[in-house]
Amino acid sequence: MLNALLAMAAIAIALGAVLGFAAIKFRVEGNPLVDKIDAVLPQTQCGQCGFPGCKPYATAIAEGAADINLCPPGGEEGIHKLADLLGMEFKPFGGATVPKPKSVALIDEFNCIGCTLCIQACPVDAIAGAAKQMHTVIADECTGCELCLAPCPVDCISMVPITDSVTNWKWKYPVYALNLSK
Amino acid sequence: MRTLYQFHGGIHPPTNKTQSNQTPIKQAALPSKLIIPLHQHVGNNARVMVEAGQHVLKGQLLGAPEGHLSSAVHAPTSGTITAIDMQPVAHASGIPDLCVTLIPDGRDEWIARESCCDWQGLTHTELRHRLRQAGVVGLGGAVFPSDMKLYAHKHKIKTLVLNGAECEPYITCDDLLMRERAAEILLGVEMMRALLYAEEVLIGIEDNKPEAIDAMRAAVAAGKHERMEVIAVPTVYPGGGAKQLIRVLTGIEVAAGVRSTNLGVQCFNVGTAYSAWRAIHHGEPLISRIVTVTGNVGHPQNFEVLIGTPMDELVAQADQLPDTSGYIMGGPMMGVLMPSMQVGVVKATNCIIAASSKLFPKAAPALPCIRCIRCADVCPAELQPQELYWFSKAKNLDKAEDYHLFDCIECGACSYVCPSNIPLVQYYRFAKSEIWAQEAAKKSADAARERHEFRESRIEREKREKAEKLAAREKSAVEARAQAPLQPAVAASNPDADPENTMQLKIQIAIDHAKEQAAAIKPKNTEQLTPQQLAEIADIEARRARIHELAKDTSDGQP
């Protein structure tokens, strides 16, 4: 009886020590789920979800504090991906968040007064310029977040939708009209 | 006798080649205008080197290669540039692209050409540079810049395969080129062989072109080319695909994601070898090519056509029949319908088929897949087309990729045999471009994340540095005051003990600093003033004083 108890206790202590050691040794910094969610988000850093950037939104989703249908730039596809990742049901867009066609900002360089307010607002440093010098958007780096529109005192920034070109054109899904004549 | 190998599958569609290969290559008439796109090759757009209104000579550079992977574009004849703008181009999308419009002056006047009678005297770097500057690209249809394929340093190339198979129905441009210009093709091949240090050259020609095989064999014997063999390969579609031809000639199977050069084989089209020779030996850039004009025309034949010739003007020379509904560029299996009949011929245009409803009747509507697996039997890439179809149709792109979607060469053999008339290749094209778009989006999202994180860390760093600087300044100022007992206000109390005093001290320091700065500023441009200017200044000062007085009065007058 006593031997059995001692043996069980010894095993328990040994396994506990192993688990305790593993918990310290293989400790994961941060929440790996946040990074996984962040990888699915489109990284526009636009704040349309109500959080100050994609990472904070990812953190909020991981903590269960935010819904998965708040990211308009990600589109419905983004919601599907988040739902798959988190094992949740798909939800349509909630509230005032509606996806728009992907656009880039364009500064009307004639009217720009060089106030640098848009440069400070840009979350991805995609606007080049200096005080009292004309500014311009680096189109390749622009995520289309629209955060530069509000601070501009002369309203010289507009959003230009990205159009199809020979380089970014996609083959369309084959769709055929039904022949209903018979 | 060489042992030939087989590739999996393949089909035997009616070849329809005899219509166009009966007459010799004809020089096409000079068109009324040329529409020359600046993006005719794989890689970056060529950089425009001319202006609208400028007169150019034949062979003059219109677009210079930009970046690592790019090629040049030249004026196909002498004339005047009338526009550089967006025009419809020979692309399935029908989206306009940047084109140079040239109105020929009829003189066809060449620019000074740098011909080279002894290419062996040139370094390999120089040869590649000249090919790049001459705009030589793969003429088999892929239009990949040829200079990029002629590097030999990484892998030992044992075999150079020359592709004269021309497996697509209707097309005969390579056939005629081999019949008529075999000697020059072989000289080009010798140059390519030297660049690649390849040991042997295998020229693969499908056995439905006996005249071309004879002509090439005669040229090999006449030119005393060693370790070069013309091999008749069985006629089976798509035997002219690079991977398929390499398999038939050498037995090497080029696996997914592997380049044939890693396995010691490089492959070029016969037309490319010919153009490379013209470029190096005659200094002629790639400004024309052989184009088969066939289909719904009275006299199907091959033309030597200037790049940029509007397709309708070219097809008219083969007597276009009135019920022609559109043009297909390429063959009936892999070709694409042109968005307009006026688009210019490009370097990739090997064939123009005038289409009509009689020639290509409207396909019957697609029926459900009955899982007969005939597509898998004919697939030359040994894929499972039916699986790919289901996954592509369901937009299950990850799964399609798992089933090696990117090994599909879009040859159309599966669609050809499908008893349900399913446009399989269209589904694969859709899935491929969707995956590419998603990858591009992922890449730009990653770049945006990186930039955003960098910005955050930069702002954080700037804040920290500012705080540190401020702290250091405060500390040094406090020390300075503490060491100066002459200051009565400070000396009277202990500044370190009383926070109120520290604050006052700080304010005092700031005020002193501001005063010092104000004293240091002197008005500029006041040294040499005329009496008139001095009078004006005095006048202004007087007015200012008066306004101050008035302001004081009104503020005093208010209750």
Image (cartoon, coloured by chain):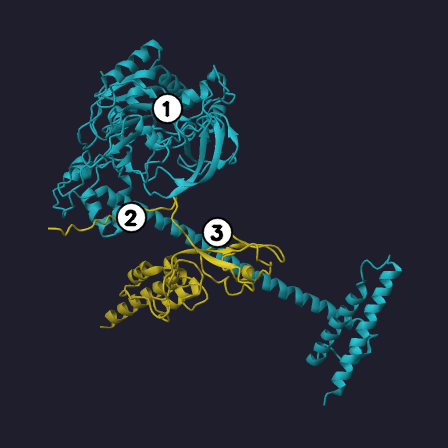
Chain colours: A yellow, B cyan
CA–CA distance in space, label 3 to label 2? 26 Å
Q: Chain of mark 1?
A: B
In the image, residue B559 lies at what x, y percent?
72, 90
In the displayed orientation, state which residue is furthest to the bottom. Answer: B559
Q: Is residue B118 visible?
A: yes
- The residue at the point 33 percent across, 32 percent down is B312
Q: Are marks 2 and 1 on the same chain?
A: no
Tell me which corner region of the image, top left, top right, bottom left or bottom right, holds residue B420.
Answer: top left
Q: Secondary structure at mark 2?
A: loop
* Residue A19, percent from left and from top: 34, 64
Mark 2 or 1, closer to the camera: 1
| Mark found first going from the N terminus, 3 or 2 | 3
**Label 3 packing within 10 angstroms: few (<14), some (14-19), many (20+):** some
Residue B312 higher or lower than B405, as above or below: above
- Describe residue B501's horizontal placement relative to residue B287 as left or right: right
Q: Secondary structure at mark 3?
A: loop
Q: Split into 4 quadrants, where in the image is the N terminus of chain A?
A: bottom left
Cβ–Cβ under 8 Å for marks 2 and 1 = no
Same chain, labels 3 and 2? yes
The residue tagged 1 is: B29
Residue behind mark 2: A172
Residue type beneath disc 1: Ala
Please state which amino acid type lies under the numbered disc 3. Answer: Ala
**Residue extending furthest toward the front:** B322
Q: Where in the figure is residue B100, as x and y percent of width and height?
A: 45, 35
Specify the farthest residue to the right.
B531
**Disc 2: which chain?**
A
Q: Is residue A125 above or below residue B436?
A: below
- Check whether the beta carbons of the residues at disc 3 and disc 1 lie within 8 A of each other: no
**CA gap, disc 3 to disc 1?**
44 Å
For disc 3, the marked residue is A139
